[in-house]
Image: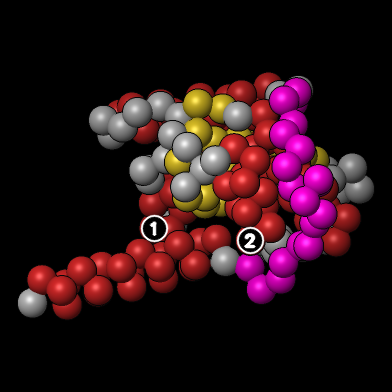
């Protein structure tokens, strides 16, 4: 009976993870590009505010605040630029991002939230918290995070990519 329960829990975990973070494509990178760690990232005020809101929510729930990692914010920024350039909102190439973070930073698990067209960090956070899979990422067993929020210069709409990792 316990084995069946453990299998069921494992299946639910895999389904939830794939639901919020799956990708149907993968970016192939050279070993040199994968191993390069980005140490400098310039945060804008909305990114800082969003990270503070996420950590405030975690603390209210009795969870440990997450530490920001510039490399993860850089990978988030790359994805924002991809979504803007391709006029899409998706998790494409999440597998490549997560593999890069695992290899470069030694993460044991990685997850991702994206959002589009929210004018304020609070509005984006509210939407994530209203979605079970996104809320699970925010409240998950993670230690670090990165975020990028970029505006499409043609439309003025904001793209959010928030990556979580356990390191």
Q: Secondary structure at mark 1?
A: helix
**Disc number at residue 92?**
none
Q: Is residue 35 visible?
A: yes
Q: Depth check: 91 or 102 in front?
A: 102
Q: How is the image coloured?
A: secondary structure
Which segment did they paint magenta? 23-41
Residue 82: name its quadrant.
bottom right
Residue at mark 1: 132
Q: Residue 68, relative to residue 78: is it above or below?
A: above
Asked whether disc 1 touches disc 2, contact meaning CB atoms under 8 Å apart, the reply is no
- Relative to 21, is 25 on the left or the right? right
Secondary structure mostly seen in magenta is loop
Residue 160: name its quadrant.
top right
Q: Depth check: 85 or 73 in front?
A: 73
Pinpoint residue 72: horizontal percent, then vertical percent. 64, 38
Crowd band around label 1 with a 10 angstrom C-alpha radius: few (<14), some (14–19), many (20+):
few
For residue 126: magenta?
Answer: no
Crowd band around label 2 with a 10 angstrom C-alpha radius: few (<14), some (14–19), many (20+):
many
Residue at image location 56% in from the left, 51% down from the top: 112
- Relative to 92, is 22 on the left or the right? left
Q: Secondary structure at mark 2?
A: helix
Q: Earlier in the sequence, mark 1 or mark 2?
A: 2
Pinpoint residue 19: horizontal percent, then vertical percent. 49, 67
Pinpoint residue 143: horizontal percent, then vertical percent. 44, 34
Residue 32: name its quadrant.
top right
Q: Is residue 120 visible?
A: no
Quarter of the figure that contains the N terminus: bottom left
Q: Depth check: 26 or 19 in front?
A: 26
Pinpoint residue 41: horizontal percent, then vertical percent. 74, 26
For residue 25: magenta?
Answer: yes
Residue at mark 2: 95
């Amino acid at each position: 009976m316990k084995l069946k329960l453990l299998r069921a829990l494992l299946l639910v975990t895999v389904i939830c993870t794939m639901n919020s973070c799956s990708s149907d494509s993968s970016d192939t990178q050279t070993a040199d590009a994968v191993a390069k760690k980005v140490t400098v990232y310039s945060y804008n005020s909305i990114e800082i505010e969003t990270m503070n809101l996420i950590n405030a929510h975690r603390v209210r729930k009795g969870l440990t605040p997450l530490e920001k990692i510039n490399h993860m914010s850089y990978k988030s920024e790359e994805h924002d630029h991809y979504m803007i350039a391709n006029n899409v909102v998706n998790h494409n190439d999440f597998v490549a991002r997560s593999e890069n973070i695992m290899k470069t930073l030694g993460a044991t698990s990685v997850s991702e939230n994206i959002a589009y067209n929210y004018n304020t960090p609070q509005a984006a956070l509210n939407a994530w918290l209203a979605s079970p899979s996104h809320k699970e990422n925010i409240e998950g067993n993670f230690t670090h995070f990165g975020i990028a929020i970029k505006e499409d210069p043609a439309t003025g709409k904001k793209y959010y990519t928030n990556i979580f990792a356990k390191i």
